[in-house]
Amino acid sequence: MATVELKAVSKIYGTTIRAVDSVDLSIADGEFVVLVGPSGCGKSTTLRMIAGLEDLSGGTISIGNRIVNDVPPKDRNIAMVFQNYALYPHLNVRQNLSFGLERRRTFKSRWRGIWDSTYRTQRHAERLAITARVDAAAHTLGIEHLLNRPPRELSGGQRQRVAVGRALVRDPAVFLFDEPLSNLDALLRGEMRTELRILHRSLQSTMVYVTHDQEEAMSLADRMVVMKDGIVQQIGSPAEIYERPANRFVAGFIGTPPMNMLAGSVTADSVGGLTFHWNQCEFPLCKRWVGAELSAIDQNSLTLGIRPDRLMIVPIDEKQDSPSVTGHVVTIERYGPLADIVALVNGKRVISRTATDALGAIREGDAITLRLEIQYAHMFRADGSAITSPRN
Amino acid sequence: MFQTSARLIRILLAVMATLFVIWAFVTVAVRETRRFWKNDNRTEIVVMHWSGEGGQEEDQIVEDALRQFEHENPTLRVRRINPGDAGSFYTKLQTMMASGDPPDVFYVGSERLPAFVSLGLLAPLDDFLKRDSLLNVKDRIILEDFYPATVKAFQFDGIQSGEGAIYGIPKDFTTVGFYWNKDLFARAGLAPPSQNWTWDEFIADARAIGKLPDCTGAEFVTWPAMIRAYLMTEGVDVKGSSFDEPTISNPEVFNALDRLRSWRHDESHTLTSGKSQIASGSSVFLTGKIGLAGPFGRWVVPSYRKIGPVNQGGFDWDFAPLPRGKVESNIVLTVSWSISNQSKHPQEAWSLVRFLSGEPTQRALARLGLAIPTIRSAAQSESFNDPNQLPENDAGFLTAADHARIVDWPTNPQFEALLGSRLDQALKTGDLPLTQAISNFEHDWRVESQSPLRSDSFPAMPWTTLGWIALIASLAGFAVWIALLRRGNLTAHQRVEERAGYFLASPWIVGFALFMAFPIVMSLALAFARWKGVSPLSSAEFAGTANFQQLFQFDQRFRTSLFVTAYYAILAVPAGQILALLAALLMNARVRGIYLFRAAWYLPSVLAGVGVAVLWRWIFDSDGGLMNAALQPLLTLFGLTAPEWFGQDAAIWGAPAFALMSLWFVGGTMIVFLAGLQQIPIELYEAASIDGSGRLRQFWSITLPMLSPIILFNAIMAIIASFQVFTQAFVMTGGEPGDLTRFYVLYLYNQGFEFYEMGYASAMAWILLLVVLVLTVIILRTSNRWVHTEGQKS
């Protein structure tokens, strides 16, 4: 159990490639933090620096209030689960699980027990303790029946459990997960995700988890760290990040399907009402944007972001009181109760997520009217940063 | 564009390959057809000789003589073969004889004559001589003009040399003696050796020179022939009336040998001890720190003439004949021109021998300084006694010739080999007391003459029956193979593919059957045969298990060679693996310029064979070799001296020296380890480091287990290689001193190509195969305990 504190942590390869750029992050004791971002964003490098597998180019990392920059991995009291599991192929599951414990034994000497009976007793007790801990971890993960098998005889999911068990058995201060689920198929991934969440709840230990899968991040995290190009974009709870993305990148990266980004401009009328112009369409903005500082420069190059589930399908002839756009359907992708409709509006593509029931008889190629739930819209400046409305 | 150029390259390669094949076959064909077109119907005589120390010049002299002969005899054409040195010569000769197509005329060293005659390889020449004399041919050979001992050397009556028919005309000869360093003699205040000096004077001179700083009195080589030359000066020999009754333990012989042993081992700096072989005998004299070196013949003169004058760092030297003991004596070592018993043109061959042994050719060769003409008048001419060239004392060789005797050997070449190796243990390395060495020799020789291979007469090898058995067996095998192929229900397309596959593999299959399978089967058959490798296969006798009986019950040297090889393997295999692994670990580092380091490690493996062996002979030289020069300062700290690797310490340090040398070739093993290391996933190390392992622990817990399949592979390859040590030993020590570096394959070679026991050598080869097989099986069987295999077990 420990806090993890990153202060201005950087990793520079060569002289110019800033893989991780001045990351500040403080992880509370018992917190489940997920680092998420597209590949190459520096999330894995950050995790490996916490583990001690990579040196820092700048900044400090502390674990449990101790600066560990120069502490080798074996002395950081951490455990790590690797993407490829990294199980020792020449050892069976039990040996894999106990490997770390064996290394940390107090009574190591094979020979001293021959003449030193106290030592022999202590050594024996220690061995029993290790066996007990391995058994307990195996029980927790439901892999007791695999203990005598070599890794090559296990399925992907079983290997994953062993890899987690190897971390679990050590009872470390911090768990590190480096994309641990990405080699599993979708079904297993969902299962393991749930189990990890349960595991965290029962252990209450600090966990740092890296993934490129934003859904996985959302479902697991207490707090998410969204990264891009080595720079932290936003830190916050999944809800915060989903509802109030700090910038266009975060808004686009989080959520499936991605947020519709409508690039346009804003005009104000005589009574102070705001109108957004996009692609030959006009829609009035909520009153809440009135107070927001939409400077003269911004007004002509703003982006309105609206999530697909806030772009509702409505009957084509129905008179709308809220803003709507009209186009025709390109494709419909059905996911059971939900369906994504990709539509072209005056040549620009938008996505709408809707209940399958609401589709009615709409086919590909049909004309369609989509209503914007404008009160849920996000506004971004030309540089990508979000504009916060006063009431936000 | 790419497609057309790829096709172009393919066509080009095909054309080149075709041209190469045509060229390879056509050059041979053209040679024959050209003769046909030229209407060359001259009779061809094949001549084979060597030109070891004589080099290019001897080669040219023989060539010129042959052209002259062709000119004088327009109906004859001479084809000349020169395989190089004497060793290659005898190997080539053996192959040609075994194939039933020996050269018509060739060199024979007098020491090989009894063996060759008893194998029926040489034609007796008495009738030719007699007829020439009757017809009074112009340039006929008059044996009375020759030094008598040289003629006797080529007479053999089936039991004894020096009597009976003559089988070769001596072309040159040498007597032996000591080369002495005039400068050291002057510094020690000694008078030059006189023409009839004694052993007492010899040893007094050696002791005096040994007292000079950093000098040794004399190099006295203990080759069997020289030991006998030494004994003859005391009026004794190692044989009585025949070789079946060795006299080596007679008191006079023993005392003479013991005196020599005492000079070598009881005194320091009087004689070099154990140093002669590694410095290849004659070459220690070149250092200028040896007062006397011998007994050597005339053959060292060309290399000693390169010593150069005093003002160029050289020294002045001369020759003194062998000192006298109770009697004045010397030996002749001589080489003849002989005629094959299978020659199809004996008359023409004889005329060539007559020409080549004649005075003009002898004189031409004498100018090389290498050998002494056997015709007295030629020897006494200016051609040999060149006053402008060292040694001054050319006459010393000739006066010695008048009371010189031949050094004959029995038809069984084991006598000389055993005498040499057993006496070396007492005289050279000093491992054994002389009495022990002598009784070992007597025992071994007695056993040798009682061996089942010597006494029994065997039935002829049933080649016809064996041939039928082999034919039926291979037909049956072929049938089974075809049946197995048919069993799989193949579609028409698969059949076509299969046929194409066999067609493409056919060059290899044919090559394997002809050049591998057939010889392998033959060697298995020969393992149960007695066959001298110099006669056609039809002369082979069926010996049953006699070869194996001899090996396991009688042959002490076989056991020694197995022991030496095992000793070497026990050292070389683990040392090689460990060093290769350590090097691979280093070379796996990600460092700038690592490719250079890797190349440097691998580089020695690129150089191989004789050159490297010669190089290492210098490194292990106990006088100023690099190894001892490096070791001595270190060892001095502990009050130790560096070993004489191939000298008196060879019993302990001989095989380890070769093991050390084997580390030179560690690069190949290293590359395999390196490839293995790079296959180990980096995450395993990361996981282990997080799990609490330091570098060393990671090596034991990750690297070694993950590398174990490669260690298994490398270890098996290394074990196989360690049982095949040959070139190094052959070049560096020739198995000496004694048999202390006679590796298994070297002994096998000795048996097959020096003692002409091809059947015996074949039996040894199959035992070697069994030994290696058993070791490999043991390792493979135990491997599941320590080798981790990644793949699923099938």
Image (spheres, rainbow, N blue to C red):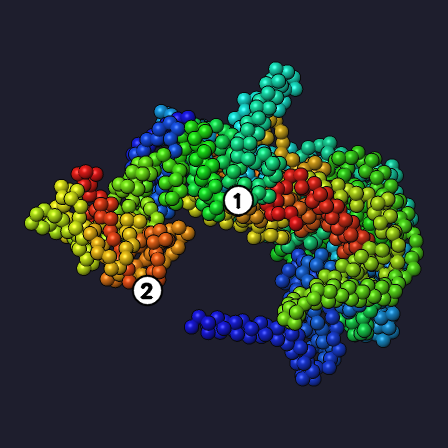
The disc, 2 or 1, on the residue closer to the chain's N-terminal end is 1
The quadrant holding residue B221 is top right
Q: Quadrant of residue A282?
A: bottom left
Name the secondary structure under disc 1: helix
Q: Nearer the viewer, residue B451 or B701?
A: B701
Q: Between residues B125 and B393, which one lies in front from this camera angle?
A: B125
Residue A114 x, y percent position in the rendering = 65, 19
Is B545 drawn above or below residue A327 in the view shown?
above
Q: Depth-wise, is mark 2 or mark 1 nearer the camera? A: 2
Image quarter (top left, top right, bottom left or bottom right) of the N terminus of chain B: bottom left
Name which residue type carries label 2.
Gly
Tell me the residue that label 1 is attached to. Answer: A156
Tell me the amino acid under the disc marked 1: Gly
In this rendered view, identify the residue nearer to me: B529 or B484. Answer: B484
Placement of B371 over or under A33, stated as above or below: below
Determine whether B427 is above or below B112 in the image: above
Residues at discs 2 and 1 in contact (Cβ within 8 Å): no
Question: In the image, what residue occupies the spot 59% across and 20% down?
Answer: A125
What residue sits right under mark 2 in the picture?
A365
Q: Residues within 10 Å of mark 2 (few under 14, many from 20)?
A: some
Cα–Cα span, label 2 and label 1: 43 Å
Residue A131 in the image: x percent, y percent? Answer: 58, 27
Which subunit holds the residue at mark 2?
Answer: A
Q: Is residue B415 left or right of residue B513?
A: right
